[in-house]
Amino acid sequence: MLTFIGLGLFDEYDISLKGLEAVREADLVYAEFYTSCLMGTNPEKMEKLYGKKVHLLFREDVEQQPTWLDEAKDKNVVFLTGGDTMVSTTHVDLRLRAEKLGIETHLIHGASIASAVSGLTGLQNYRFGKSASIPYPYESRRGARIISETPYDTIKKNSELGLHTMVFLDIDKDKGYMTVNHALELLLEVENRRGEGIMDRAVAVGIARAGSEKPVVKADYAENLKGFDFGKPLHILVVPGKLHFLEAEALVKLASGPEEIMEETE
Ligand SMILES: C[S@@+](CC[C@H](N)C(=O)[O-])C[C@H]1O[C@@H](n2cnc3c(N)ncnc32)[C@H](O)[C@@H]1O
């Protein structure tokens, strides 16, 4: 049996009681922290709470050669991830591989950044369009610095429809956790190149450490927000589309956003 367990957003205590019980009953505990991670804890603290050894898996172990899956044929195996295991991950692939091997699979959900964003900003979840992810720039074979323009295009399409965009930020094993500041610099660099007026006039919202006792939520024009100190990771960015008046009020009152956004609401 293989049970996918979402660990929630910040520390080892964010796991549900159902999840905790399942981990304690498991024969083997695997975890991956490359799609998301809990910044308020570490594997040692988790092991202490669970009373179990946590075996860490890397992207290759999950997405290419999940040989460890075979153990779930005759053992009770749990697989842990930050947030909810199936939100903005490709872990459904792992579930399908397990089912093909005749392994019974179960899900135990965790709080996800996808819902925390609406909770913290007041932006309504049904007014979001397609999400985007910003990867770190990379070097072409000729040594040119390449910035992906896909997130800019997604924001543009959503904003034309009046929809908000949730922008996930890269987690790279060498370059670390991308900040809201870096993400805005990259989007503004694309804006400078293309001059389509999407980002330079946009109000953006940065969120740091959702799920912690003191998450930071700040709204401002992208140009101003890129210099704001959000503190430690994880960070996420939202580019709102057309605002309902309640959403605008929430951004002003709860995220210290600029008052003039109240003037152009639905
Ligand atoms: C690819 S998504 C995976 C989401 C995860 N499966 C979930 O349900 O929460 C991970 C990205 O979401 C954002 N994120 C996740 N947890 C966060 C948190 N507690 N605070 C701020 N941003 C977070 C970061 O940008 C991170 O790189």
Image: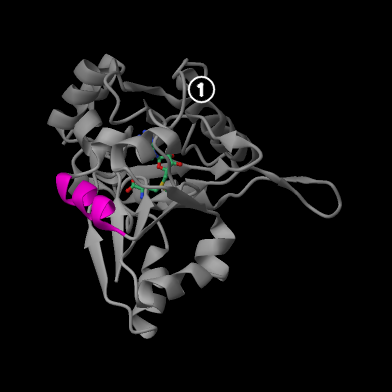
Q: Is residue 153 visible?
A: no
Q: Is residue 221 visible?
A: yes
Q: Position of residue 175 (x, y in %)?
A: 64, 37
User: Foreground residue, 22 or 233?
Assistant: 22
Above or below 233: residue 147: below
Residue lying furthest right: 142
| Residue 71 picture quarter | bottom left
Which secondary structure, mark 1? Answer: loop
Q: Residue at x 26, y 20 (%)?
A: 213
Above or below 25: residue 20: above
The reply, left or right, for residue 74 in relation to residue 139 is: left
Q: Magenta segment, which residues?
A: 17-26
Q: Position of residue 234 (x, y in %)?
A: 43, 32
Q: Position of residue 61 (x, y in %)?
A: 55, 62
User: Foreground residue, 177 or 145?
Assistant: 177
Q: Which residue is mark 1?
A: 226
Magenta segment's dominant SS is helix
Q: Quadrant of ligand 1?
A: top left
Above or below 180: residue 116: below
